[in-house]
Image (spheres, rainbow, N blue to C red):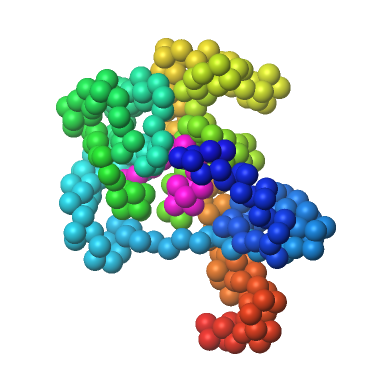
Amino acid sequence: MHMKGWPFEENGRIYIPELDGMFSVTSSAFEGEAIKTWNRWFESIGHVHYPIGPLSVPKAGLHGGDGHKEDATYGPVVEFLDRMKDKFGENSVIYISFGSMFWPIDGSRVWAMAEEFLQNNTPIILAHPGLQNEADEEKLSLLRDSPIAMELKWAPQETILSHPATGWFVAHGGWNGTQEALRYRVPQIFWPFGGDQPYNSALMTRTHKAGFQLFNVRSGEVGKRTPYVFDSKEISDQPIPTFTLEALRQEVRDLLVKLKGEEGAVARRNLERLADGYLKGWDEDGEARRNTEDFLRKFVDSDLGSRITAKFK
């Protein structure tokens, strides 16, 4: 996978077999079977593997720290979310962000989705740092003219995710955003592009049943092949995707019914349970802490791990 000239997979193929071991920012709570497989492979070549997730700390949160005082977006964002909470209640706002590097090739699908949310009286915040198309720029008026929408070129993501008004997070499913969704217990609506995103999306929606995935957003020759979950009848409660804008609009309308009904409630409860397990990694007997202590004992100082543990008790 080449991303801005960085050959990630090729570097991994070359260097991983030459190393003594590897840290991975994940946990058995999230992908236990994958970690078991990874560990067996590393053991077979005499290496060690240390899952140490989560490896993130709240930078801002809603009121955490003083960093927001210099952030011009903080006040307007919190004011908007407070207003939406008063009008629509908790978990009512859908936050849409594809990060700083990605934006869908076919922007018309973003606007079709946004229009359906707004037409169904669902407030949204859309972050668009990767926006480059003039046609997309013109569409921003859709949000600027709506009393229940907000658009941002840069968004204070943790402030948004930590606010009680925020209910759902439309994202590509990259690991950074997925970790933040777990930390703040905001279930995701996945729109994956590539890399680890389809895997994370499938794991969250199909294994953990802790979110939803959009299918009619796909484009391109390969993207428009029928997903095998429909061929295998794994998904039987929605039409086979046809990848048209009208099909996407209908998918979003159907999704909103799920979000506001029992299926949405189940996904939220499953996400909260998953987050509870994932975020325990650094507890006294958590997986991340145990693995870090094992690393210190093996590679740094045989007594160091126990001394550090004693300090935190």
Q: Which residues are magenta?
A: 163-181
Q: Is 25 situated left or right of 114 in this image?
A: right
Q: Is 85 situated left or right of 54 in this image?
A: left
The answer to whether any part of residue 37 appears in the image is: yes
Residue 34, position in %: x, y? Answer: 70, 49
Residue 199, position in %: x, y? Answer: 60, 39
The answer to whether any part of residue 32 appears in the image is: no
Residue at the limit of the structure toward the right, as seen here = 44
Q: Is residue 278 above or below residue 99?
A: below
Seen at 47% across and 50% down, the residue is 176
Q: Quadrant of residue 66?
A: bottom left
Q: Is 3 situated left or right of 285 in this image?
A: left
Residue 128, position in %: x, y? Answer: 31, 36
Q: Nearer the viewer, residue 301 or 242?
A: 301
User: From the image, which quarter does the N terminus lie in?
Assistant: top right
Q: Is residue 262 on the magenta stretch? A: no
Q: Is residue 171 on the magenta stretch? A: yes
User: From the image, which quarter does the C terminus lie in?
Assistant: bottom right
